[in-house]
Amino acid sequence: MLTLRYSPASDSPGRAGRLVNTWRDDAGQTIARAFTNGVLSWIEWPQLGVFEFDAASTVVRVTPAPGAPKDVIETTFVRSLQPIVLQALGWQALHASAVATPTGVIALCGRVASGKSTLAAALARAGCVQLADEALVFRCHEDRVRVHPLPYARDLRPSAKEYFLSGEPPLPAVPSPAQAIGAAYELKAAFILAAADPQARPAIRHLSAVEAFSVLLGHAHCFDDDDRRHTQGLVESYLALAAQVPTYRLTYPLTFASLPEVIGLVLGTERRREILPSRLPPA
Amino acid sequence: MSEIRGRLSPAPDVVSRRLGEAAILIDLETARMFALNDTATVIWECIRDGGPLLEQVRACFDEPDRVPPGQMAADVAKLIEELEGLGLVGVSAMSDRDDMSPLPYPVPRPRVAEWSRPSVVPIGTVAEALPRGGLPMPGLRSSD
């Protein structure tokens, strides 16, 4: 959806801007920072370079850091920066995994370590097509919410990798761009994942649209919450999302043994909604 | 309705949306968010659409005559006072050009079965609702 173009260092003089976002690694060290001056926005990633964009274009210009490997720049741009930049440009990005079912797309939202990736992989093994692992880009069109799959990589814990490697059937590969990327799918349900006691049974509760709005906003990527126009686009999109997409809280023990029951609950909830089939990517 | 002093309209910075029987209002100026209950939602929509307020509010209820005399007007006036205090509606002086005659077309609105005391409840700010401390960069967080 976005194009990356390289700029020589001399084309990108230092400029002053307002700091709008900082990303850190697990150790708390800064990975990247985002700035805007109202016209241009940019993300400084000291190890990779400066990625610059504006609202009038879908081209992102990168000034590589000295010695930064081109393949790392491009992979990072596609998998990590693209959802952030798209959100800055007017799409929305949920912190969620997602799968396509025969009836539409299901988003799986949750905090870090809530089991999003593992559940998405388990649903993929159960026949769904995984569309996102950690960031789900969407746009609201009148009475529909369309998701825009982007390239991603599965990021499973070692124990989850082992679980999927040892089990049957094998975990399907991440869909190729030709299979899943770039198509628009309709979002039909969102599940907010929450850990339960290991002895508890998985349970689903439908959230009112008002509850759903507040909860979904808690999983929203937001490039600049100090910018009023940007905030307006964000809240209008999440109000539309809450109004149009049934949202459920799914509480379950984070154990592999619970996954079959959880899958049954998620897919059963979807089937009971009697919704129209939407596009699935070709097998 | 003597309690309402002029022409009412939603403040220009307010984004609103009905969500089921309730509604959310967001003041973009302050980024504060509010939830309206079902009765307040109907009143808000009648304010937004213009026209004679009480008459329109009454028309949204299945059995408006079950509401004790004077209660509806008093509740509406109290809600308006709260909305005004929160900066969510503006009350401007009536001019000769303000038309308070019934709207020339029916405004389709969800029906409400029972009158309940209208309420507007603050639910925090947009910044408070967003993930605290931001979200991890996609593709670079701890395994999930």
Image: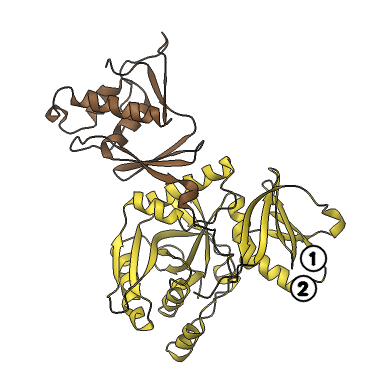
Chain colours: A yellow, B brown
Q: Of all residues shown, which one is farthest toward the front?
A: A28
Chain to which mark 1 belongs: A
Left or right of A258 in this view: A175: right
Protein chain holding label 2: A
- Residue A84 vertical placement versus B110 (above, below): below
- State the image quarter where residue B9 is shown: top left
Residue A203 screen position, x and y as percent? 28, 69
Q: Report if residue B72 is visible in the image.
A: yes
Local crowd size for mark 2, using a 10 Å CA cut-off: few (<14), some (14–19), many (≥20): few
Task: Please name the residue shown 23% across and 23% down the image.
Answer: B73
Identified by mark 1, the residue type is Ala
Q: Nearer the viewer, residue A255 or B101?
A: A255
Q: Which residue is mark 1?
A: A65
Question: SS class of the residue under badge 1?
Answer: loop
Residue that appears at 50% across and 76% down? A283
Residue A86, how many percent across, how many down?
Answer: 61, 55
Instruction: Name the amino acid type tagged 2.
Output: Pro
Mark 1 burial class by Cα count in 10 Å: few <14, some 14-19, many 20+: some
Q: Which mark is residue B24?
A: none
- Residue denoted by label 2: A69
Horizontal side, residue A55 vs residue A272: left or right: right
Please identify the quarter of the rendering in which residue A227 is found.
top right
